[in-house]
Image (spheres, rainbow, N blue to C red):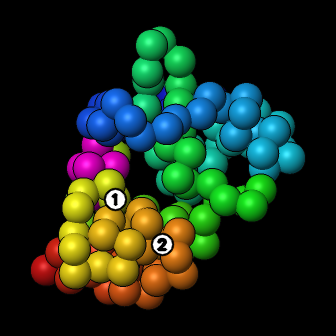
Amino acid sequence: MSAIPLADDVLDADVAVVPVAEVAETLNVAQNKVRQMLRDGHLIAVRRDGDLMIPADFLRDGAVIKGLAGTITVLSDAGFTRTEMLRWLFAEDESLPGATPINALRTSHGTEVKRRAQAMAF
């Protein structure tokens, strides 16, 4: 089994993160499925206090927020590291609805977020 790619913990201390077990429970899947989602680039994790943690903002209503996996793919194709992706997703951008890319995704503005991610690749 391949290692799970991790981002450096560049999140502000007030950004809520949840352990893999809680993500699995929220998504109603096995923990191994969550680890596979991390390997496949559908989610990004950090190690905080020795534990594998996923930002709580990646989840809503028992699912991964719509557009997150596609945005991660676009950023990966653009050469971003997991750490750079996480930093970009949580960076302030007042021109976006929601003020950050992750909040824009959470408020159904995924097309605009992906458009901006694609534009950064050029």
Q: Seen from this angle, which residue lies furthest left? A: 122
What residue do we see at 26% from left, 50% from top?
A: 87
Q: Residue at x 83, y 44 (%)?
A: 29
Task: Kindly identify the amino acid type of the residue bearing the numbered disc 1.
Answer: Leu
Q: Can residue 77 be seen by looking at this rendering?
A: no
Q: Which residue is mark 1?
A: 89
Sequence order check, earlier mark of 1 and 2: 1
Give the number of the disc on residue 105: 2
79 versus 2 height, above or below: below
Q: Are marks 1 and 2 in contact (CB under 8 Å)?
A: yes
Q: Is residue 113 above or below residue 64?
A: below
Towards the viewer: 100 or 39 = 100
Judging depth in this view, the residue of 37 and 10 nearest the camera is: 10
Q: Type of residue at label 2?
A: Leu
Where disc 2 sits, the SS reads helix
What number is the disc on residue 19? none
* Quadrant showing the N terminus: top right
Mark 2 Cα shell of 10 Å, populated few (<14), some (14-19), many (≥20): many
Question: Which segment is the magenta one?
Answer: 83-88
Q: Could you say whether the residue bearing mark 1 is in a helix, strand or loop?
A: helix
Question: Split into 4 quadrants, where in the image is the C terminus?
Answer: bottom left
Does the magenta-highlighted stretch encompass residue 58? Answer: no
- Residue at position x 48%, y 72% in the image: 105
Instruction: Report, in whole angstroms, how far the alpha carbon at label 1 lies from the one at label 2.
Output: 9 Å
